[in-house]
Amino acid sequence: MIDRSLFNVEDFLVDNTFQLYCAGTDKLCISYWENYIKAHPEQETVIAEAKRLYVILSGNKKPLNKQVDLLKNNIEPQNEADIIPIHKNYMWLKIAAAVLLMVGVAVIFKNNPKENTPKVSLVTNFSTKGGEKKKITLSDGSVVLLNAKSTLTLDKNFNEKNREVNLVGEAFFDVTHNKSKPFKVHTEDFDINVLGTSFNVKIYPGEATSETVLIKGLIVMEGKGTKGSSITLRPSQKVTFYKKVDELPSNIKPQKPSVVHPQIAINQYTKVNDSTIVEMAWTQNRLEILDQTFAEVKGDLERWYNVEIIFNDREVEKYRFTATFRHENIEQALKAFQDAEHFKYEIKGNQITISK
């Protein structure tokens, strides 16, 4: 039995039944929380704040049941005696059918990425090349550290009407707190709703996985094409999206074939030496490799050293390495790998061919 009497705002926000109550989509949850609030008046202020933040993080959408009630009240005539009941019922049936049609179209539109138009008008771009990082201070005071081969694009109304950005690649965000104007990160696989927090997002095109790591604060992630489902992250948690079933680790059970990809895993971020967070090492100019295959670190090596790596042997791709690189060049890194596994490499310009 969960003891909710000591819940703070974050505890309520990450409680699934409370989310369903705020969304107005589950009658049992609505009934439970209405009774709970009556029985715990001492938590009224905290619960009200949690509901307010839920509305902000969900895009200021009214609960579904409230939307339907509001629509019904607005369209029903004030003088009911002037209308025969059967006509009134028929009018409501037509309106209900129209609402269902609009909801159906909205769901189809949302889950058809080919027909979906951009949510924001993106005009201001920041980008980095291979081997380059860039620190950006936004107009709202938020700081973004952009990793190699990444692009951050701002909405033209950023910090005026909204705080929305689009990311391709990897970036660390330290977001300035603003309750009335949440920060939102759009990516290819998911959207992230933020109030004031620090987190890292890694989502490179063509790679088998994408991930988000929360350092502090609270974020709500919404997967693309998942019918509005969301994940609320606590500090030190990491969400990994596996875009291909054959890339799943052995300890993660794949979902049914009918379930839309990506597969999702939630873990803690990885720490070494009780101080270094592997997923954040790049922000401190370190490349941390922890029991990863050659194939898994290929993209990181290419971006870190601004090179292209080609494997001529599938077996070499499976070699596993653990290493830390700071100031080493690519050849020094490859020689360090050779101390652990036998392979050959040839460097021609920025292209590196690796064979057994």
Image (cartoon, rainbow, N blue to C red):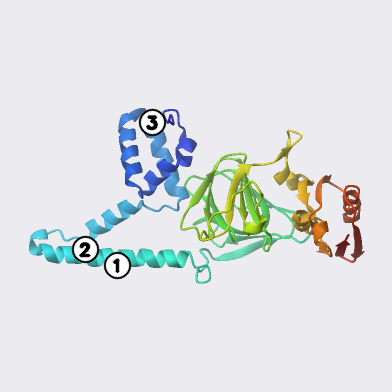
- Side of 111 relative to 352 (left or right): left
**3 or 1: mark nearer the eye:** 1
Q: At 35% from the left edge and 48% from the top edge, which residue is drawn?
A: 24
Image coordinates for residue 114, horizontal then vertical, percent:
53, 71
Q: Amino acid at mark 2?
A: Trp
Q: Which mark is residue 92?
A: 2
Q: Amino acid at mark 1?
A: Ala
Residue marked by disc 3: 43
- Side of 123 relative to 56 (left or right): right
Above or below: residue 99 compared with residue 48: below
Q: Is residue 131 visible?
A: no
Q: CA distance from mark 3 to mark 2?
A: 39 Å
Residue marked by disc 1: 98
* Picture quadrant of residue 19: top left
Q: CA distance from mark 2 to mark 1?
A: 10 Å
Instruction: Give yes or no for contact between labels 2 and 1 (Cβ–Cβ under 8 Å).
Output: no
**3 or 2: mark nearer the eye:** 2
Quadrant of the image for the C terminus? bottom right
The secondary element bearing badge 3 is classed as helix
Image coordinates for residue 232, horizontal then vertical, percent:
52, 45
